[in-house]
Amino acid sequence: MTTLTKPTIPFSEAPWISGLPSPYFKESHKKLREFVRRWTDQHLFPNAARLEESGKADPKIYAQAAKDGLLIPFALGAKIPRKLYDEFAEGIKLPAGIEPEEWDHFHDYVLCDELHRVGNGSAIMSMYGGLAYGAGPIVNFASKKLQERFLPDLLTGRKRIALAITEPKAGSNVANLSTTAELTPDGRHFIINGTKKWITNGVWSDYLTTAVRTSGKAGDSNGITFIIIPVRGPGSEGVELKQMKMTGSSASGTTFVDFDQVKVPRENVIGKEGEALKYIFYNFNHERMTIAIFANRYARVCLEDAIAHSIRREVFGKKLIENPVVRYEIGHMARQVESLQAWIEMLLYQQNNLTVEQANVLTGGQTAALKAHAGIVLENVCSGCTQLLGGLGLTRGGTGARIEQIWREVKAFTIPGGSASVMIDLAVRQQLKLIQSLAQEGRKSGSKL
């Protein structure tokens, strides 16, 4: 039986880590937790500040992640297809020796949660921010030929990929994208023109899984196609990548991409031409769930460091933690984090026992609300913890280093993946639609809802 490393600060870990009973976490989840915890301590904590300061990814860390099997789950998803693993992983073992058929949404959670304990987006997003979303369309919708061309290099870390959807004038409204792809007269290539913006890992990537318009005009939901575009080396002529300066997480490689008469083989199209919008929506649940997981761990990091400081710090002859007002503030933050934890685990269980298609319909609204709530909780907790640390919470390095870093990254949780206000509205609309659909099914079957 695996012995879990126990927390020394209250509210710094989920209840199951503290040894409380849980219906969700098994021995393999515990093994994975300890494996990723050690990996994070060894490879991310010592390098996080350097990565943030330099604004550059570290190829050695990426290669180590590939060697230790951490890239495979990010590429292949929360439920790893055994067939693709056997064909393309080239013998690389999954973390902690877990078999592909064992891997589930809770393993996915443990991996994401433990990596984010470092509390630094540069260390984490520079490693997998592109792969986690750029490989999915290839895994789920590409032809066998495309999978054979790209997946071996992606799973082993020899090449990198990112997802390129967002445009300067098309954020949450994906149908509004206007990057065009026009067929050459011989029908063998597309000529790509347009721009993409805020593309995570773009400058570190060899390929972009890119949403382009092959028919119709901006605003049309049809006519959008996924195509793999080389952005480095042969075939990348006409592609310009510019790293953007962002608030926090500087090594994530957020990129402005310009396509000027870029010639791409038609065989690089993923799935059916004109149907990329449904492919994009297919992964929204998973993306929003992972953002909620990240936010929850970041909130725990803030609490851990703020409570540890309150236990050590003496003010007017007594420890900060002895002040009822301080305990009141900590308690208010803790109740938000523990509630968020329970909601995450409940939805993970539901999605673990549904197909992706079923989960998109039945849990889409809840996941949108969860994503919004997670960002709001993180913002509240990080603000409160910064206040508790005073000047230390505004200082890069030292006691408040993780909290100060997270404060600069907070809006990366409330804006990307669907802004909080949009997500809350979507959640209500989705739930109304769902309840109406269930009522209609009930009437057809003659049962009562």
Image (cartoon, rainbow, N blue to C red):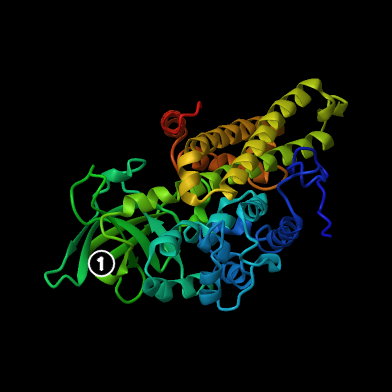
Q: Residues within 10 Å of mark 1 (few under 14, many from 20)?
A: some
Find residue 161 and report its horizontal and vertical position in percent.
Answer: 43, 64
**Residue extending furthest toward the right:** 317
Disc 1 element:
loop
**What's the residue at 37%, 63% (across, down)?**
208
Decide if residue 94 is in sight here.
yes
Looking at the figure, which quarter contains the N terminus?
bottom right
**What's the residue at 56%, 78% (across, down)?**
90
Side of 44 relative to 310 (left or right): left
Q: Is residue 391 above or below residue 180?
A: above
Side of 165 relative to 183 (left or right): right
Relative to the observer, which residue lies in front, 105 or 32? 105
Determine which quarter of the picture holds residue 329. Answer: top right
Find residue 309 and report its horizontal and vertical position in percent.
Answer: 78, 37
State the residue position of label 1.
238
Residue type at mark 1? Gly
Relative to the observer, which residue lies in front, 70 or 363? 363
**What's the residue at 54%, 43% (across, down)?**
409
